[in-house]
Image (spheres, rainbow, N blue to C red):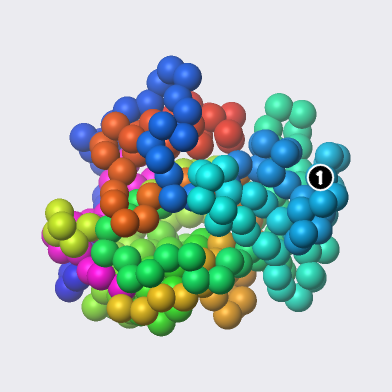
């Protein structure tokens, strides 16, 4: 991956469409699936014995609904005290207040193919990591000082990076990140619009932890609402699958995209 192209404002939706109907994410056989609106997956303790039931309850664990057992545990300076379940009655999300984050030890090996979609709202700050799959030479998606979306594969440097589309504080969005060596491509989509791409794919050269809302070492914590995330690792989502996933995640924010 050598070059990046920023998406211009006003770009139309790409051929990666889809959505509509009663879509069930289980039908795409995801590698991981996190859904804070399903209270049966949220717990106040890392052992998963004390259920989350009420607005502002502390969250220290979110279970993976994919069936693969990639359950995420909260770590960080607040030890879970700053990761909370929030609800407006109809909508549900987690907030970390820029302190705590989720982490699971090394669930994936070397990665050459995959798609990750996340529904979020940045609350404040910059230089924030949305997720990281393996440190140093793995994958990572983040917002840096210019608040753009960045996607790094096989090393966190400009040579392996694409970027585009500002993530304004207080605005909901669904961001999707795709990399494929087989298809010689990588791209970022925001609300189904492709905002950056590269005509090559990179394979990660190391394995490591899977971290949500921070980097693997706990830096660059993402101060945000987290509405959910779905990913396929080892293979990419088809255009229809990705479109359906993005529509489903948007609905978790009360939006139609």
Q: Position of residue 9 (x, y in %)?
A: 31, 46
Residue sitting nearer the eye, 14 or 124: 14
Is residue 202 one of those drawn in magenta? yes
Residue at left offset 69%, top offset 44%? 41
Quarter of the image with the N terminus in it? bottom left
Relative side of 214 to 136, left or right = right
Return the residue found at the far top.
21
Residue 142 location (% of width, % of height): 46, 65
SS class, disc 1: loop
Q: Position of residue 4 (x, y in %)?
A: 22, 65
Q: Is residue 171 visible?
A: no
Q: Position of residue 57 (x, y in %)?
A: 84, 49
Quarter where residue 53 is shown: top right
The stretch drawn in magenta includes residue 51: no
- Asked whether residue 11 is in view, the answer is yes
**Residue 106 versus residue 128: which sits nearer the camera?**
106
Taking the spot 38% from the left edge, 69% from the top edge, the residue there is 109
Where's the C terminus, which quadrant?
Answer: top left
Name the side, left or right, on which 133 lies relative to 17.
right
- Main secondary structure found in the magenta portion: strand
Q: Pick the residue in front: 43 or 120.
A: 43
Q: Is 167 placed above or below 158 here?
A: above
Query: Left or right: 253 with respect to 47?
Result: left
Between 62 and 12, the one nearer to me in the picture: 62
Q: Which residue is mark 1?
A: 52
**Picture mark count:** 1
Q: Which residues are magenta?
A: 185-204
- Disc 1 packing (10 Å; few <14; some 14–19; many ≥20): many
């Amino acid at each position: 991956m050598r070059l990046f192209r920023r998406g211009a404002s006003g770009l139309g939706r790409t051929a990666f469409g889809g959505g509509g109907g009663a879509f069930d994410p289980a039908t795409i056989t995801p590698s991981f699936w996190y859904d804070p609106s399903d209270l049966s997956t949220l717990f106040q303790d890392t052992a998963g014995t004390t259920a989350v039931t009420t607005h502002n309850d502390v969250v220290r664990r979110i279970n993976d609904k994919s069936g693969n057992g990639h359950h995420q545990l909260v770590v960080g300076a607040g030890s879970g005290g700053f990761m909370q379940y929030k609800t407006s009655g109809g909508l549900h999300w987690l907030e970390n207040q820029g302190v705590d984050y989720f982490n699971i030890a090394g669930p994936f090996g070397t990665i050459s193919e995959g798609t990750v979609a996340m529904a979020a709202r940045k609350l404040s700050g910059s230089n924030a990591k949305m997720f990281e799959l393996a440190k140093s030479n793995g994958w990572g998606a983040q917002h840096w000082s210019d608040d753009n979306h960045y996607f790094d594969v096989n090393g966190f440097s400009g040579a392996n990076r694409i970027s585009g589309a500002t993530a304004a504080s207080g605005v909901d969005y669904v961001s999707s990140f795709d990399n494929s060596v087989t298809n010689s491509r990588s791209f970022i989509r925001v609300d189904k619009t492709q905002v950056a791409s590269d005509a090559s794919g990179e394979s990660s050269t190391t394995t490591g932890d899977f971290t949500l809302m921070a980097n693997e070492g706990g830096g660059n914590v993402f101060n945000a609402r987290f509405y959910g995330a779905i990913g396929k690792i080892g293979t990419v989502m088809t255009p229809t699958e990705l479109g359906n996933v993005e529509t489903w995640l948007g609905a978790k924010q009360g939006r139609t995209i």
